Amino acid sequence: MSSYFELELDTTGPNIELNMPSYVSFGDNTWISIVATEDLLINYDLYLIDNQGVRKDLIFELNDNTLEGYLDVTGLTSGIAEVNVQVYDEVMNSSELLKKPFMIYGGNSNVEIILFVDSVGIDNDIWNQGTSMNIDTQPILIRDIEDLKVVIRTVQMGVE
């Protein structure tokens, strides 16, 4: 009587899905979860990178095949940020590095806002230039509060 057995090796990493909103605000307790197709080890890489390139590591709770926790954006700047996550199954096979962009709102930061204005003539007194300036569906870049005040004053003047 001959005996044999078949050995199958797990050589593939888990597939993961990141469940989170597309935007968060400073001060919000935003709950996110990372769900894998198989049980995970406690070892994982989970971090945020903001629009200034600042990295912030996150520590989440592991429950079998799910990492869960609050998304803490304290210390980051407003704008587009990215969650990066890579997990490992029970035999140390790694998942793909998953990157998911999201928007951080609020806080004190230098966020550039682009407004599109249709057919607005800007008075030369506002711009302190020798001639008037017409904008026809052109973007106006708002870099700071002073730029925004100029646009608001222009709209309040009723210049068309």
Image (spheres, rainbow, N blue to C red):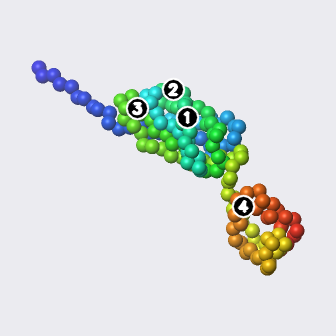
Q: Secondary structure at mark 1?
A: loop
Query: Measured along the vertical axis of the image, is residue 137 above or below residue 85?
Result: below
Mark 1–mark 4 contact, CB under 8 Å? no
Give the residue type that dot 2 points to: Asn
Circle 1 crowding by C-alpha within 10 Å: few under 14, some 14–19, many from 20: some
Q: Which mark is residue 58?
A: 1
What's the distance in space between the residues labelled 4 and 2, CA to CA? 45 Å
Give the residue type that dot 1 points to: Leu
Residue at the location (42% across, 39% down)? 95
Of labels 3 and 1, the one closer to you: 1
Nearer to me, 96 or 6: 96
Q: Secondary structure at mark 3?
A: strand
Give the residue type that dot 3 points to: Asp
Q: Earlier in the sequence, mark 3 or mark 2?
A: 2
Residue at the location (69% across, 37% down)? 28
Residue at the location (40% across, 32% down)? 89
Q: Which mark is residue 89?
A: 3
Residue 106 screen position, x and y as percent: 71, 46
Give the labeled residue for mark 4. Answer: 142
